[in-house]
Amino acid sequence: MLPMKLKAFLTLYLALGTLFFTGYFDEIITCVCDYCQESNHTCLTTESCLTILKRGELEDEGVIERRCILDHGERMTTCEYPEKDEKYEQYLQYRCCYEDYCNENVSIAFPPFPAATSPSTKKGQNSENFTTEQTLVLITGGCFIFGVLVMFIVYRCKRDVEASVPSESPAGHVCGYEESSGGTGLPIMAQITVARNISIIQLVGRGRFGQVYRAKWHEEDVAVKSFNSSQDGSWNRETEIYQTVMLRHENILGFIASDTKDTGSYTQLWLITDYHQNGSLCDYLQRTTLDVPGLMRLAHSAAKGLAHLHRHVIGASNQGKPAMAHRDIKSKNILVKDDGTCCIADLGLAVRGTSQGLVDVPTGTRVGTSRYLAPEFLGDFDTVSSLDGYKRGDVYSFALVLWEMTRRCVTERVCEEYQLPYYDKVPADPSVEEVYEVVCVEKYRPYCPDRWERHPTLKRVSKMTKECWKDKPLSRLTCMRVSKSLKNYMEEAAMDQDDAI
């Protein structure tokens, strides 16, 4: 029998634990939303409700806006750690709350404008005796001093911008710069104060969209994806996709905020996410070999992230996560975390299914990177119009990534050097036509070494890879099936390793 004090302590501990986990994972609140006409001016979130008061031209005039905060990063920057700026607070006021309809009737008042200090009315006796020449001298001198001050400020701003751009880090010769182009989409409200608190540290990547930097935010490492000003549609689209309800997952890159940064001469469009120092899977495999458990950990986590993206998650009042497809799966768009697992990144080309069974495909964009395109997208890709078709294209691309990973797994004390898929058939930056000739005309697929067939786990992985890159989309496995199979292979590999020890 347990002592009464110990039983009481355990009961209290379990009760508090139940309340903590239930509140953290399951609590969804309903907020008033001025922009949500389709849902009766309400929205659902797991973060908080937000009320914004914008000051008008008159001192007592204000405009109220109400909506949901959908992302943890926005809640942190808006509600938990807002930047204090007395001048800024005279024109914008925020209020966050955490209960159903708590932002329906929120009373917010602006602080009064500071009293204007009037100049002294006392004038010296000689002020009445200014001549016209003296007045002109004062005006000319003031304009000259103002012009010199403006030139000095412009010079300092230009020098600070040039000094803030870090030197470029060397890029791998195999992965190259095969980056996806973004799509168009509706703009999402940026987190106003984030960019002020971010310090750029180092350039870590460059592509057609712009650059990726390692930066510091509140003493934490973050990644800043800086879009060129001409890529504002891509920035808007990726921000919109990352703010999809219930998208967050341990194997999808964590989104913090999006913002604009005025450098003085041009505007940068920033997308701020978690930073992973191991870089992309492509870079990681070039410098690292894998054992079988390590291979299965990478493969299963990447498949689990993609399966979550593909899955439709049902929420209250039909506000859950829609099924989605990535459309640009490749080793360069998968990042490796410190624990040896992967997360899916670069959602600029992702598409979502709608309640009417349609797909919100951005206009004017082509699917993915030519080397990783499924056969049905190498020809007339307009024939693929369903979300299921795009998801099966993701599975084909993932099979090529799985082939890249398996080549670097050591068995029989050997492994193959890292190479991109079809490295022996197409040039470093192949056109769609060149890949079409190899994949669709020759029906060629990457070579799987014989040693894979002599290892029980790699043999299963090799068989599954071949089932995922078949010509006919309907013959391929689903990503959920791939994820479950890889989980089983991972557990078997761990047991075999324990037996060997």
Image: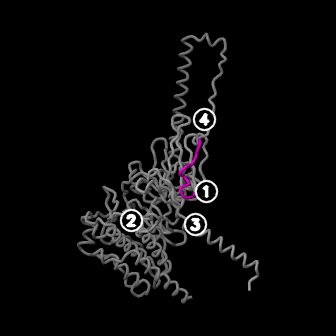
Q: Which mark is residue 219?
A: 1
Give the quadrant of the N terminus: bottom right
Q: Residues within 10 Å of mark 2 (few under 14, many from 20)?
A: many
Segment tinted magenta in the rendering: 98-109
**Percent x, y for residue 214?**
52, 57
Label 3 element class: helix
Against 247, residue 80 (above or below) is above
**Percent x, y for residue 167?**
50, 53
Q: Residues within 10 Å of mark 4 (few under 14, many from 20)?
A: few
Quadrant hosting residue 15: bottom right
Asked if residue 104 is among those painted magenta in the image, a careful observer would answer: yes
Quadrant hosting residue 87: top right
Q: Which residue is mark 3?
A: 24
- Type of amino acid at the residue the image marks with label 1: Glu
Q: Residue at x 42, y 68 (%)?
A: 309
Relative to 264, 421 lies left or right: left
Give the quadrant of the C terminus: bottom right
Judge depth for marks 3 and 2 and give the one in front.
3
